[in-house]
Image (cartoon, rainbow, N blue to C red):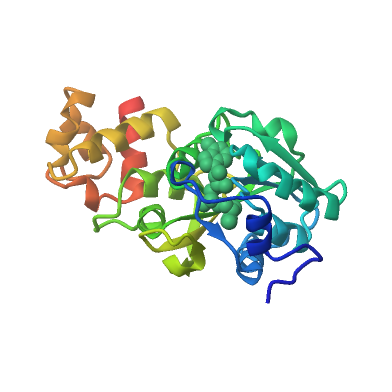
Amino acid sequence: MNSIDSLPPLRAVIAAHGLSARKALGQNFLLDLNLTAKIARQAGDLTGCDVLEVGPGPGGLTRGLLAEGARRVVAVEKDPRCLPALAEIAAAYPGRLEVLNADALALDWAAHLTPPIKVVANLPYNVGTELLVRWLTPPAWPPVWRSLTLMFQREVAERIVAQPGGKAYGRLALLAQWRCSARIVMSLPPEAFSPPPKVHSAVVHLEALPEPRFPADPKMLERVVATAFNQRRKMLRAALKGLSPEIEDHLRAAGLAPTERAEQVPLEGFCALARSLAG
Ligand code: SAM
């Protein structure tokens, strides 16, 4: 089952290089190469694209990305124990895999890639949300990347694609959906990983839109959304009163009832409120 290339099965790679999983690094490895190829395919056509992968570990998804035809893969891995296994993959795909032994949170990754760029990763759970927020808030839009295809805990994936009216709806949904299309494309049970995590996982595919769905200043929108959801059970006029002494007027100008709660407000309403406050 594990034959998308001429390299050894991942269990053998892990045993040969002593890659016992470390919890502190969020290490839950995917060992089925059919599954990693399927995840790679969720990113669409990779030929002609550079791919950024964060956390390749023993390289299951890396192999999927290369076998699916990525022009180049730049893989950023913090754990130096994984480097020999990744070097074997680099040798099997000459000139197509660059491995950077670095912390993805501290790296200027864009300097290593040439557009068009897609990001594909089975993210370490402890830094996944932080990385997503950074990718979604670049200094200018459209961003340097075209799409993000990312594995998260199912609960985080649901927060990214959430619609108004539920508990999952909040800052992450608004941030993601303002300038991207976002959908869950795969669900994985704990047993798909070694060792199995405690929770279910899901792959989210986000495509950058050429421009935001509704105009708004990114900093003001972020401030409004963060403030509104900080006290999500309160009515907007109370939750947002720190933003302006005339908050009720701004809410009405944005077409929102001051008695509404953040959970009920669609993206368009937050953008209108951000515009009114900025104006
Ligand atoms: N891609 C592999 C797979 O699917 O089997 C491994 C995924 S595992 C969930 C997360 C990987 O991210 C681990 O290899 C871990 O060492 C690495 N990692 C954790 N924190 C990191 C960071 N800050 N920067 C780069 N890699 C990191």
Q: Along the line of sight, which residue is nearer the eye, 202 or 182? A: 202
Q: Work out whether 150 lies above or below 142.
A: below
Q: Work out whether 44 lies above or below 235.
A: below
Q: Along the line of sight, which residue is nearer the eye, 207 or 84? A: 84
Is residue 207 visible in the rendered structure shown here?
Answer: no
Q: Along the line of sight, which residue is nearer the eye, 78 or 117? A: 78
Image quadrant for the C terminus? top left
Q: In the image, what residue occupies the spot 23% across and 33% down?
A: 250
Q: Along the line of sight, which residue is nearer the eye, 59 or 127? A: 59
Residue 139 percent coordinates (x, y): 55, 28
Is residue 176 visible in the rendered structure shown here?
Answer: yes
Residue 264 percent coordinates (x, y): 23, 53
Q: In the image, what residue occupies the spot 59% across and 45% down?
A: 55
263 left or right, relative to 133: left
Residue 92 percent coordinates (x, y): 84, 55
Q: Work out whether 200 lies above or below 113.
A: below
Image quadrant for the N terminus? bottom right
Furthest-top residue in view?
Answer: 245
14 left or right, relative to 122: right
Q: In the image, what residue occupies the spot 57% across and 33% down?
A: 103
Furthest-right residue in view?
Answer: 94
Residue 201 percent coordinates (x, y): 43, 61
